[in-house]
Image (cartoon, rainbow, N blue to C red):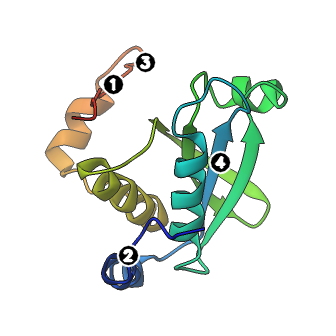
Amino acid sequence: MVDILNDNLKIQVSEAFTQLKEPVQILFFSKKTNCDYCDETRQMVEEVTSLSKQIKLSVFDLEKDYEQAAHYRVDKAPGMVITGRDGDQILDYGIRISGIPSGHEFRVLINDLILVSGRDSGLSQHTRDILSGLTRPVLLQVYVTPT
């Protein structure tokens, strides 16, 4: 099997991962049929997690492990939940990725891992103050299509 990440990219990601502070857990959901990019996404995530001991990977089948998928509100494959890990406890910050994070979205995956590891969003105090005034949940979704 040929690596998805080339050596130069692995070096860049490894250097970025020097910023990792706390353990991170990726929950990866795929399914065996009717899943474009599941195999490629899993391979990519396995290669990424191999670049740091701070990142662990758990793999689930969206249909077989439906209770886990429902718990984390994952309904698409491939899908990922980027969480913190504190011993056996999973810290869910609500970060979900659906589809293969290729192109510019790969940078988003790496940045998400670093942010979750730091246990801080990086938002300014002004933004935090505005967000603290929200009175109901907000769902923010970003859609990207491969070109």
Q: CA distance from mark 3 to mark 4?
A: 23 Å
Place of residue 22 in the rendered image (x, y in percent of width and height, measured from the top left): 54, 72
Q: Which image quadrant for residue 120?
A: bottom left
Considering only order in the chain, which callout, 4 or 3, is on the residue closer to the N terminus?
A: 4
Which residue has dot 3 on it?
A: 137
Mark 2 Cα-neighbour bin, 10 Å: few <14, some 14–19, many ≥20: few
How far is the residue under mark 4 from the one under mark 1?
Answer: 20 Å
Question: Residue 144 lies in what quarter of the image?
Answer: top left
Tag 4: residue type? Answer: Leu
Which one is in front in this view, the residue at disc 2 or the one at disc 3? Answer: 2
Q: Which residue is mark 2?
A: 6
Mark 3: amino acid: Pro
Residue 119 in picture, x, y percent from top left: 46, 61
Q: Residue furthest left?
A: 126
Badge 1 amino acid: Leu
From the image, state whether disc 3 or disc 4 is nearer to you.
4
Q: Image quadrant for the N terminus?
A: bottom right
Relative to 129, is 16 above or below? Answer: below
How many angstroms separate mark 3 from mark 1 (CA)? 10 Å
Which circle, 4 or 2, is nearer the viewer? 2
* Residue type, numbered disc 2: Asn
Q: Secondary structure at mark 3?
A: loop
Mark 1, residue position: 140
Which numbered disc, 1 or 2, marks the residue that appears first in the sequence? 2
